[in-house]
Every structure is written in C-alpha cells, then in structure tokens.
Amino acid sequence: MRATGLAALAVPVGGMAPRTLLPTPSLPAPPICRVADLALAAAAAPGPRRSLKLTWNANAICTVGVPVAATQGIFARHNLDVELINFGGSTDQLLEAIATGKADAGVGMALRWLKPLEQGFDVKITAAIHGGCMRLFALPGSGIHTLAQFRGKTLGASDMAAPDKNFFSIIAARQGLDPEKDLTWRQFPADLLAEALKRGEIQGFALGDPLASLIRDRDGLLEVANNLDGEYAQRSCCILGVRGSLIRQDRAAARAITAALLEAQHWVHERPDAAAEIFAPYAKAPVPALAAMLRSHTHNHHPTGSALRFELAAYIEELKLVRVMRPNTDPLRLSERIFADVLSGAPA
C-alpha cells in the first residue's frame, strides 16, 4: 500500500450497513475475545535488555503501532531495543527472513500470511493488531451499491494475492457468487486503480489504507464495502508474527515484543491524532486524513489466545471458499499450528 504523492481531504468513514452472509461452515462459536491485560502488557521482560529486529511496512498505516512503540518508549519499557526493518519484498521472503533469524518478528496481513504459513515457515502468530483497513470502491452514479452488483463485472486489485482481493472474494462467495466465474479481477499498480476505474477498464477496485481512503476522498468514490461490515467489525485483519525459535529459546522476549505492540495499539486507539502525527512522515499524507483512518479502524480489537485462534481458523475456512487454501485443510488444526499464546503461562 503506497501513499506517495497523494493529497486528500480528511473525510471520516461512515459505518457501513451490515449485510446478510452465509455462515462460515465447520467452525464452533467464537470464544469471548481475551485481550491482553494491560497490567501484563506493562510488565517489562525479566532478565537483561534484549535486542530484537522487527519488520514492518512503513507505507501501511496498519503498522502505525510500530513507530508509536518506538517513539513513545513502549519498547524500552518492555526492556527491548528494537531495530525496525522496513521490508518491501514478497510475503514468502518476509516470512523466510523471520523464520531464518534475519528478523525476530514482523507485522502483516492475515489474509496474505495464512497461505504461506500453511507451507510450514517457522513463524508463529502471537497477536492480532487491529481490523478495518480494506475497502471496495465504485464510481458514483454507476448503479453499483452492493458487492453482489459486481456480478459479471471486472474488479481491480494491486496484486492477485492482495489481502483485500482475498477478503472481498470471500464476501462474494458468502453472498452466493462464484468468485472465479462471476467476478473478473485485473491487476494494476495501486496508484493507478482509480484511473483504470475512470477509464472503464474496471467497474470497481479493492485496496487497503492509507491509499484507499486517500483516493476515495480525492476522487469522490463510492465506498461499497469494507472489512468493518457485520461480523467483520469484530474480526482483525493485521497480525504479529514471531520467529518460532525465539519463542522456544527466549519466550520472555517473544512475550515482551507482543505485549509492547498490544500496548502500542491501545495507545493508538486512545490517541488517534497523536498517532497520525507520528505516522505522517512515512505516509506523506495529511495528519487529519490519517487520524480519520485510525478512528475508522479497530485498534482496540487485538485478540490473543483462543480468540485469536478462532479468528485465524475462520479466515482459513473462508479462504477455502475462494480456493486459496487446499480443500482438505483443517482450519482448527492449522490455526493451532501457526499461533502461539506467549502471553499466557502455557508452554509454546
């Protein structure tokens, strides 16, 4: 997600009306979300001060908690010296970097990470970070007001494995469309999606913040849907992954980086304007626009433990609907394998 060269007026996102969805099959009812206790999050890791490397995408406002934790002394309070690595490579390269010790942890999107994690990278998801940063647009006056009205039309995406493409394909499938037959997806550079829409090459496009909100406000686009609709208002989209060997060898360090980022998310939720000012140099976007995005996201929703495992399993089951995951993948078994509850007293 890129924001370079864009200027936009800040227009807060309005709530989207819930839509009726088919139930996600084969999963039990979700547990009550267990957010990390703030007293736990405030406790420094025992022992010597630890040095860790954390990967993040400095262009993605999803990762705002990372510079917040660095500038507000949250990492230091958790007895950590954290080197930030702005990583722009592929997801496979990112997960390999974490798994092989070139980095110790990283922040990313669940709907981009789950398929590579199915292949066996030694990376464990220890916490969700927040939800609500993916959006689907159409032109005003196009007559398109719901995702179902894209049947037989062409949608744009920044890449064919983009999390927003996966998400809206899932929603289409749950609303009775065949994402492969009823929708056609075309790839464009993220900052050219709006031009493709205006030229009629596509009838809508999916994109994530900050670029999504900036383009919407700049060009007056209609936001057809987002990942805050209905049940997804209580589903996270961004996650923290930690090197498996770090969890096994130094669980306190894994606990500290997880707790620090959860504390940072709470800080973002409580102080969106200040968080926007911290992130603005990376996004090169107006602070009011960034603050409006942060208010529209759910930075107070960051499950761990069984609540996190359920959210991962739900996404895995849904990715089977759009043929991203293998049809015989067991969502609960895979979610158990790829997550770790480092904030509890249970062993990794």
Image (cartoon, helix red, strand yellow):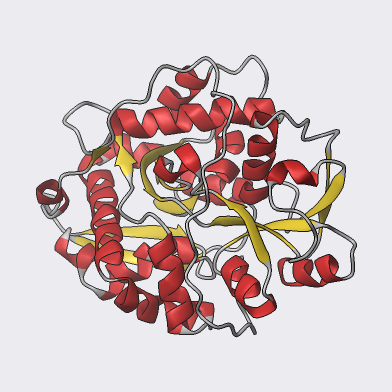
Q: Position of residue 272 (x, y in %)?
A: 33, 71
Horizontal and vertical percent for residue 205? 73, 57
Q: Residue, x 49% and y 62% (percent of image)?
A: 14
Q: Quadrant of the C terminus?
A: top left
Asked whether 241 or 233 is in front, the reply is 233
Foreground of the two, 58 or 137 = 137
Please state if 266 lies on the left or on the right of 189 as rendered: left
Height in image: 219 above or below 263?
Answer: below
User: Above or below — where is 311 with respect to 128?
Assistant: above
Give me the residue at 44% from left, 50% from top: 131
Picture residue at 49% right of the left edge, 84% below the top: 286
Q: Is residue 119 visible?
A: no
Q: Position of residue 281 (x, y in %)?
A: 46, 83
Question: Going by the image, does 91 lie left or right of 193?
Answer: left
Residue in front for this viewpoint, 287 or 204: 204
How many badges with numbers are in the image? 0
- Quick check: can you spot residue 209? yes
Q: Quadrant of residue 49?
A: bottom left
Residue 108: x and y in percent read 50, 52
Location of the N terminus (image quadrant): bottom right
In-image side of 183 versus 253 (left or right): right
